[in-house]
Image (cartoon, rainbow, N blue to C red):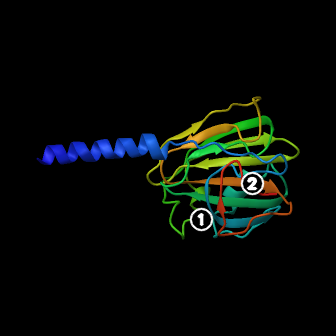
Amino acid sequence: MILWILLGAVLAFFLYWRVWFLRRPRRTIPKNGVVSPANGKLMKIIPFHDETAVVPKGMLGEVNVLTKDVAKEGYILVIRLTPLDVHYQRAPVSGAVANVKYRKGTFKNVVSTNAAYGAFENEKNEILLDGTFPMKVVQVAGIACRRIRCDVKKDDVVKKGDVIGLINFGSQVLVILPKKQLQVQEGDYLVDGETVLV
């Protein structure tokens, strides 16, 4: 009896993962603007200027490393993905992939309300895009997510809305932008490929 219950639980989890978690709904990609690369809640908007950013002490170096090839001044958008959100990432703009860089790190919880800054220390994959202006999408591993998949490489050309990667289970995606007029605010729920950021 216990064996059947365990087998049922494993089957239910597998079906959830294959049918719901790995779903990739069709999106209507707007012609103008930079779209969200990820589906989830916008937890934090962190402004940066040269070497100054409003982050906990000790993380400033991590912030500088992430932003230095984008702009001297701009924003870091922290998007939280729960197990209920779509976990594919899409190109926020059309353009060339200028660089892809994987960084080792920890696997802290990045889904809880107080974990907005976990992305700076966790394992991550950075995708630098060169469209109308440079910007970066950073895929971040979480406490349960130990696998980041990147579907693009340096010198690839992508169209806005193309799938560029996947992160399994709870995780975060960072969007690093030069200073522009944001069309979103903290607490907004973003739809990958549809919500206009700037």
How many dots with numbers? 2
Q: Nearer the viewer, residue 10 or 25?
A: 25
User: Could you say where residue 112 lies in the image, as x and y percent from the top left?
Assistant: 50, 66
Q: Earlier in the sequence, mark 2 or mark 1?
A: 1
Report the side of 117 relative to 60 (left or right): left
The alpha-carbon separation of the residues under discs 2 and 1 comes to: 14 Å
The amino acid on which the numbered mark 1 sits, given as a three-letter code, is: Ala
Q: Secondary structure at mark 1?
A: loop
Which of the 4 quarters of the picture holds residue 188? bottom right
- Residue at the spot x=79%, y=55% of the render? 177
Determine whether, in the image, residue 161 is placed left or right of residue 23. right
Q: Secondary structure at mark 2?
A: strand
- Locate the C terminus and report the quarter of the image it occupies: bottom right
- Classify 59 as above or below 96: below
34 vs 103, left or right, is right
User: To which residue does mark 1 refer?
Assistant: 116
Mark 2: which amino acid? Ile
- Residue drawn 61% across and 47% down? 139
- Image position, residue 91 (x, y; %): 72, 42
> In this figure, which residue is indicated by the disc labeled 2?
176
